[in-house]
Image (tube, helix red, strand yellow):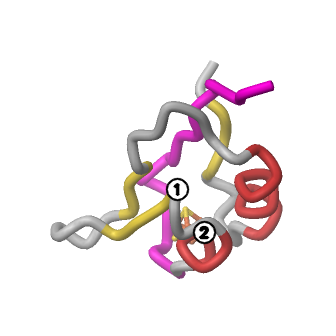
Amino acid sequence: MKNTRKPIIDLSDCILCGVCVDVAPLVFRMNPSGYIEIVDLASYPETQIQEAIRNCPARCIGWET
Ligand code: SF4
């Protein structure tokens, strides 16, 4: 089953460590302004994103509700 839930980042807590980009480079990227953004995808790889959520030191990644 495709996962259409989208991850979100609370940028006010993000410390730009790059862990999420390392863990799920197809989902998270640094934009030209120097902030992390979510790539627009039709569906999101749940396992990789859960891994990013677990490893984010600022605990600022979650799922859109
Ligand atoms: S892992 Fe968390 S703190 Fe690090 S860049 Fe990604 S969202 Fe920001």
Q: Is residue 57 left or right of residue 8?
A: right
Residue at screen point 50% across, 31% down? 42
Q: Residue furthest top?
A: 65
Q: Nearer the viewer, residue 15 or 21?
A: 21
Q: Disc 1 residue type?
A: Val
The answer to whether mark 1 and mark 2 are in CB contact below 8 A is: yes
Asked if the magenta segment contains residue 29, the reply would be no
| On-image quarter of the N terminus | top right
**Residue 20 in the image: x percent, y percent?**
60, 69
Disc 2 residue crowd, few under 14, some 14–19, many 20+, Cα 10 Å: many
- Counting residues from the start of the chain, the first of labels 1 and 2 encountered is 2
Q: Is 12 drawn above or below residue 65 in the view shown?
A: below
**Residue 19 in the image: x percent, y percent?**
62, 77
The disc placed on residue 27 is: 1
Element at badge 1?
loop
Element at badge 2?
helix
Magenta stretch: give its range. Answer: 1-17
Q: Disc 2 residue type?
A: Cys
Q: Is residue 60 left or right of residue 14?
A: right
Whether ligand 1 has any atom under 8 Å from the Cβ at mark 2 is answered as yes
The prevailing secondary structure element of the residues shown in magenta is: loop
Residue at screen point 39% across, 62% down? 36
Residue at screen point 77% across, 69% down? 55
Q: Is 47 drawn above or below residue 40 in the view shown?
A: below
The disc placed on residue 20 is: 2
